[in-house]
Image (cartoon, rainbow, N blue to C red):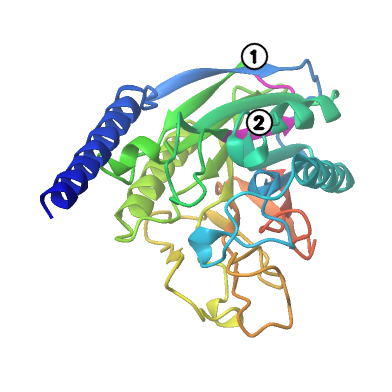
Amino acid sequence: MKKFFKAFFTIVFLAALAAGAGLTYLTLNEYNPADVEDVNVYGSTTKPVAPGDTISVFTYNIGYGADDANHDFFMDGGKTVTTESSENITANVEGIIDTIYAANADVNFLQEVDTNSKRSYNIDEANLIATAFPEFNSAYATNFQTKYIPYPFTDHIGMVNAGIQTISRLYTDSTAKRIALPVAFSWPVRTCQMKRCLLVERVPLTDSQKELVLINLHLEAYDSSGEGKAAQYKKLVEVMKKEFSKGNYVIAGGDFNSVLPSVDTSKYPLKNTEYFEPAVISTSMLTGGWKYCTDDSVPSSRLLNEPFDPESENTQYYVIDGFICSPNTIVDTVMTIDTQFKYSDHNPVMAKVTLVK
């Protein structure tokens, strides 16, 4: 018995030592971006925009090329951690590129774009997308960078490098801004969590001192208290209000992970709140003509609890993707594009917006 207990406590000690070393490594290498950072805008597009013009905007959470209709995800109650092959990632990214091309929008906000992650076989998806649209400019802001995620214990997620990407045919400044959002988690969980941000680009307008301010976003999803979502949305509102107060036009778009006020929540009732429950955004923080742009005739997202099956009683839909536009705009149309979640667990959303003179 003495030998047994000695061996047992030795194993426990070594396991604790390894865990401590791992946590120290992750802490020392934690991604800690500044509150505001410059982001390079690559490309030389020259399409001018002036007050009175109508532009088209498109948003798509691409699920890092892995969350297609044939897959589930363990954090949503499914089983899959990593899709089975790099070929599957490549095929999905090619389908996503085709979807963007078919929409033919002036501005494209993309979320969950990997550059070098184990979960997407280290494929540089941002480069594939930028290269596919040589007539567009491209900006990329990191919002997820960790040396290693030792979870789940049976098949570690491993290294992640991911972010949000904006590709646009509009003439923009040569640099964009990465504006940090409040982090929803505390140490030590924070070391392996997303450091979410806004990617802000500015479009100088022809014959005007005003600018069109484009904001790509991906807000918090999994904080249980909801305080993270609320703090990040508050920061977004502050940025939008500040730009509008200057007389600028503002279009913010992306994956809000929350239900915008324009959505009829009765269309997609919550069947399962165990893994993900979106917050509902109030109109109280943005009054005076701000526009919430969604199309709830088609869901924009699904729960990855199982491969997509529209006939399954377990299929859970959401409408959490869209745009918020400033009062000096007119939203002419907004449409969720029904891809049947073929390439991602999200459907893209597209709007046409006129800048009022």
Q: Position of residue 295 (x, y in %)?
A: 68, 65
> Rounded to the nearest whole Å, what is the CA distance between mark 2 and mark 1?
28 Å
User: Residue 187's image quarter?
Assistant: top left
User: Residue 338's image quarter?
Assistant: bottom right
Q: Position of residue 312 (x, y in %)?
A: 68, 82
Asked which secondary structure carries label 1, the reply is: loop
**56 sits left or right of 76 in the view:** right
Q: Establish if 313 lies above or below 4.
A: below
**91 sits left or right of 249 in the view:** right
87 or 124: which is nearer to us?
87
- Give the residue furthest to the left: 2
Nearest to viewer (mark 2 / mark 1): 2
Looking at numbered disc 1 in the image, what kind of residue is underneath it?
Ser
* Residue holding disc 2: 122
| Residue in the image at 51% along x and 81% along y | 271
| Residue in the image at 45% along x and 19% along y | 37
Residue 174 - label: 1
The magenta-colored residue range is 163-174
343 or 51: which is nearer to us?
343
**263 sits left or right of 349 in the view:** left
Q: Position of residue 36 (x, y in %)?
A: 41, 23
Residue 66 visible in this rendered orientation of the protein: yes
In the rendered image, residue 83 lying in the magenta stretch gets the answer no
Asked which secondary structure carries label 2, the reply is: loop
| Residue in the image at 53% along x and 29% along y | 142
255 or 163: which is nearer to us?
163
In the rendered image, residue 170 lying in the magenta stretch gets the answer yes
Residue 170 visible in this rendered orientation of the protein: no
User: Residue 195's image quarter?
Assistant: top left
